[in-house]
Image: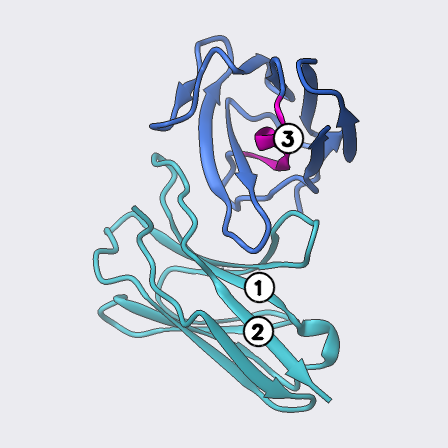
Chain colours: A cyan, B blue
């Protein structure tokens, strides 16, 4: 069973900030939270990874509350090319990696 | 980031033939490799986990005699789809285990 729950789809407009929230109520102490982006006919592309609090890189921010039961991927100023499926994964070094259904993000002009 | 390659990127074969898909981790060594398949508009589904030098572990419902996995070295794992049928047509993706999990570009298999 996937360890995560996300909205099935979201729409937004170019230039907006998009926040995608993921629920992972049964996250374990050793688990990290990782987000991926996937375009059609391509493998998932790593976006960002975190354990707790906030992580920021050149493309996104990841917010993780203290209880770690959820996380929010924030994409600043999206463009049409950000239209993709986004997967939130809970990953530990010792376990297999199971994908949830992901969030299909559609950016409108 | 880590680079993972797959070969071929796409393959079309006749029903009943076997197809081999290679997955290479180009800049690190991986003792464990995950193999996934993905049908249109669906998420990635884990097929099996292979470990270098030992037998692969298959997920429930995945036929180990049909999907042969070999993990002969720390940088190469292969998936062979034996006696392929149209229902095996899918997008196959590998991912070597690492601290940050990277995925291959995928192989599109079409069985006629």
In this rendering, position of residue B87 left or right of residue A79: left
In this rendering, position of residue B75 left or right of residue B36: right
Q: Does residue B91 belong to the magenta stretch?
A: yes
Look at the image and give the residue range highlighted in magenta: B85-96
Mark 1 neighbour density, 10 Å: few (under 14) some (14–19) many (20 or more) = many
Q: Nearer the viewer, residue B81 or A65?
A: B81
> Tag 2's secondary structure?
strand
Q: What residue did someone put label 1 on?
A: A85
Q: Nearer the viewer, residue B33 or A67?
A: B33
Locate residue A57: give its quadrant: bottom right
Mark 2 neighbour density, 10 Å: few (under 14) some (14–19) many (20 or more) = many
- Please check whether the numbered discs 3 and 2 fall on a single chain: no
Q: Residue at x 69, y 23 (%)?
A: B21
Q: Is residue A46 visible?
A: yes
In this rendering, position of residue A67 left or right of residue A71: left
Q: Is residue A78 above or below residue A99?
A: below
Label 1 to label 3: alpha-carbon separation: 27 Å
Residue B107 in picture, x, y percent from top left: 70, 35
Q: Nearer the viewer, residue A69 or B27?
A: A69
Q: Residue at x 73, y 79 (%)?
A: A80
Which mark, residue B28?
Answer: 3
Q: Is residue B26 visible?
A: no
Q: Residue at x 68, y 56 (%)?
A: A40
């Amino acid at each position: 069973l996937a360890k995560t729950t996300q909205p099935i789809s979201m729409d937004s407009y170019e230039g907006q900030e998009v926040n995608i929230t993921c629920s992972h109520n049964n996250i374990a102490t050793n688990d990290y939270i990782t987000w991926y982006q996937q375009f059609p006919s391509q493998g998932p592309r790593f976006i960002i990874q975190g354990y707790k609090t906030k992580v920021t890189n050149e493309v996104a921010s990841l917010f993780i509350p203290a209880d770690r039961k959820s996380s929010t991927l924030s994409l600043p100023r999206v463009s049409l090319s950000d239209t993709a499926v986004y997967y939130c994964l809970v990953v530990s070094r010792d376990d297999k990696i199971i994908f949830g259904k992901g969030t299909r993000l559609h950016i409108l002009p | 980031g880590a680079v993972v390659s797959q070969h071929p990127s796409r393959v079309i074969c006749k029903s009943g033939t076997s197809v081999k898909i290679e997955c290479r981790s180009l800049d690190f060594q991986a003792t464990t490799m995950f193999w996934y398949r993905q049908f249109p508009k669906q998420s990635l589904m884990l097929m099996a986990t292979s470990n270098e030098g030992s037998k692969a572990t298959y997920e429930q419902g995945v036929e180990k005699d049909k999907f042969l996995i070999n993990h002969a070295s720390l940088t190469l794992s292969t998936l062979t789809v034996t006696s392929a049928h149209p229902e095996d047509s899918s997008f196959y993706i590998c991912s070597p285990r690492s601290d940050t999990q990277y995925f291959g570009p995928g192989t599109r298999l079409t069985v006629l």
